């Protein structure tokens, strides 16, 4: 294998894992970001490595759900009216790929990566000495009504049959015993038993970054917007001066669209923004809880109980409008005694999404030595190591862990 000089732009979970997988294969890697690793999108998620998430989040099809979203009444979805015209083409594609028969094919391809997520994280967690951040007991969907629990149990049975995911159902008494901090009786829960949960998502990315340095990689501060093609490959400006390499990887999460547009690529990309807040001193849940009928997560974290919201459709740079956080907090207080929040204002981040629900992993169609690695939507934290492995195998020209064809940038044309 020929050693390559490679620039990786973006130090979230995706970019950090990309740099790490390449360094573990002997390449000379520079990881560049404007901030420390794991301080943007990867910092703010619910901290679950979701190997059971073999189907991506589809665009809702239920008319009642769509009406609630349109009226902006729930905690699970919100939108900025002024952002919709620019979002419509990508959202139309998202809606179309969420319907049969396209969705079945997309889900199969998507699940090829997510189902391998725990197996791919495991050796990196071991090498990084991050076992103290991880629990291996799954997480729970909780339900307020029996009908909703029964419906999800049927879906879980199908996924177990088709994809081998494991779960168990807890009735009302079993849930009350497992989660004594709950203030009210619920219908029950469905516990996905295979996923792992992380008490500090940003810290896990930082541990991976520290491992990268031990493997010979470099981490520098710089401006990814200065990326340009040179005779020898690619160059970007950093605080340490110009950085050059034969290869460059754009792994900038929600900022990837800006980067590739400057190179002439127009892909159906959009963002789903999300908020979180911590509540220290609360008796929190034992395992992360997703209120499946209200659309928020309560997760035990190092900083306290983390409350995360659903999706907000808005421009990436639009001012924060945390109306979902207020609604989610009111709903969460029905379940747990939450003290005053730790943060003065809710944290805001953005998930990088594609119109066909699949990440973009592979070579740029028109630029030699340039690689795209973004668009993982809700599952960048989950997919980081396995997706990075697939990209590293393409760069090396070795046998891939899965067929890369469904994720190649070329599927959107040149």
Image: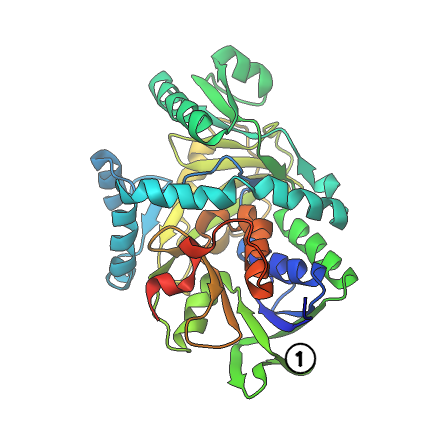
Taking the image as shown, residue 250 lies to the left or right of residue 93, namely right
Q: Quadrant of residue 81?
A: bottom left
Q: Which of 331 and 55 lies nearest the eye of the viewer?
A: 55
Q: Quadrant of residue 238?
A: bottom right
- Residue that label 1 marks: 239
Which quadrant would the C terminus be assigned to in this image?
bottom left
Q: Which of 307 and 252 lies nearest the eye of the viewer?
A: 252
Taking the image as shown, residue 126 lies to the left or right of residue 321, namely right
Q: Is residue 121 above or below residue 210?
A: above
Q: Is residue 331 above or below residue 187?
A: below
Residue 391 at what x, y percent from top left?
55, 59
Q: At x 41% / y 39%, what residue is drawn?
A: 55
> Could you tell me which secondary element the residue under label 1 belongs to?
loop
Q: At x 68% / y 66%, what residue is drawn?
A: 1
On the question of residue 56 being in view, the answer is no
Identify the residue at the far bottom of this view. 231
Residue 11 at what x, y percent from top left?
60, 62
Residue 281 at what x, y percent from top left?
65, 35
Identify the residue at the far top of this view. 173
Residue 351 at what x, y percent from top left?
45, 54
Q: Which of 59 and 186 lies nearest the eye of the viewer?
A: 59
Classify mark 1: residues with Cα within 10 Å, few (<14), some (14-19) or many (20+). Answer: few
Q: Quadrant of residue 143?
A: top left
Count how many numbered circles sit on residues in the image: 1
Q: Which of 345 and 74 lies nearest the eye of the viewer?
A: 74
On the question of residue 136 being in view, the answer is yes
Q: At x 42% / y 78%, what residue is drawn?
A: 263
């Amino acid at each position: 294998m020929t050693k390559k000089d490679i620039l990786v732009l973006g130090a979230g979970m995706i970019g950090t894992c990309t740099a790490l997988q390449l360094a573990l294969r002997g390449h000379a890697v520079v990881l560049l970001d404007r901030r420390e690793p794991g301080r943007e999108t990867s910092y703010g998620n619910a901290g679950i490595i979701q190997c059971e998430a073999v189907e991506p989040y589809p665009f809702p099809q239920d008319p009642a759900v769509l009406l609630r979203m349109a009226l902006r009444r729930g905690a699970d979805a919100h939108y900025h009216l002024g952002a919709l015209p620019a979002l419509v083409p990508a959202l139309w594609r998202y809606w179309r790929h969420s319907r049969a028969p396209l969705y079945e094919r997309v889900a199969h391809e998507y699940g090829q990566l997510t189902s391998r997520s725990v197996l791919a994280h495991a050796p990196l967690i071991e090498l990084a000495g991050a076992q103290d951040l991880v629990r291996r007991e799954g997480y729970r969907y909780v339900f307020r009504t029996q009908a909703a629990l029964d419906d999800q149990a049927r879906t879980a049975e199908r996924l177990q049959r088709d994809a081998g995911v494991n779960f168990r159902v807890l009735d009302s008494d079993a849930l009350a015993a497992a989660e004594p901090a709950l203030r009210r009786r619920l219908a029950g829960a469905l516990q996905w038993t295979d996923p792992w949960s992380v008490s500090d998502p940003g810290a896990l990315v930082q541990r991976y970054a520290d491992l990268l340095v031990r493997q010979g990689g470099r981490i520098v501060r710089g401006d990814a917007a200065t990326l340009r093609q040179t005779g020898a490959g690619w160059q970007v400006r950093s605080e340490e001066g110009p950085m050059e390499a034969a290869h460059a990887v754009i792994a900038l999460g929600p900022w990837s669209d800006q980067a590739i547009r400057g190179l002439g690529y127009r892909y159906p990309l959009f963002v789903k923004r999300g908020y979180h807040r911590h509540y220290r001193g609360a008796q929190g849940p034992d395992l992360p809880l997703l209120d499946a009928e209200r659309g928020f997560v309560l997760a035990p974290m190092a900083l306290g109980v983390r409350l995360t919201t659903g999706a907000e459709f808005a421009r990436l740079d639009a001012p924060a409008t945390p109306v979902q956080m207020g609604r989610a907090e009111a709903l969460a207080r029905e379940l747990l005694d939450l003290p005053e929040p730790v943060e003065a204002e809710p944290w805001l981040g953005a998930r990088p999404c594609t119109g066909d629900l699949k990440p973009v992993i592979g070579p740029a169609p028109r630029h030699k030595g340039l690689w795209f690695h973004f668009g993982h939507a809700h599952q960048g934290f989950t997919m980081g190591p396995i997706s990075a492995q697939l990209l590293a195998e393409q760069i090396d020209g070795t046998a891939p862990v899965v067929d890369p064809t469904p994720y190649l940038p070329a599927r959107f044309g040149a």
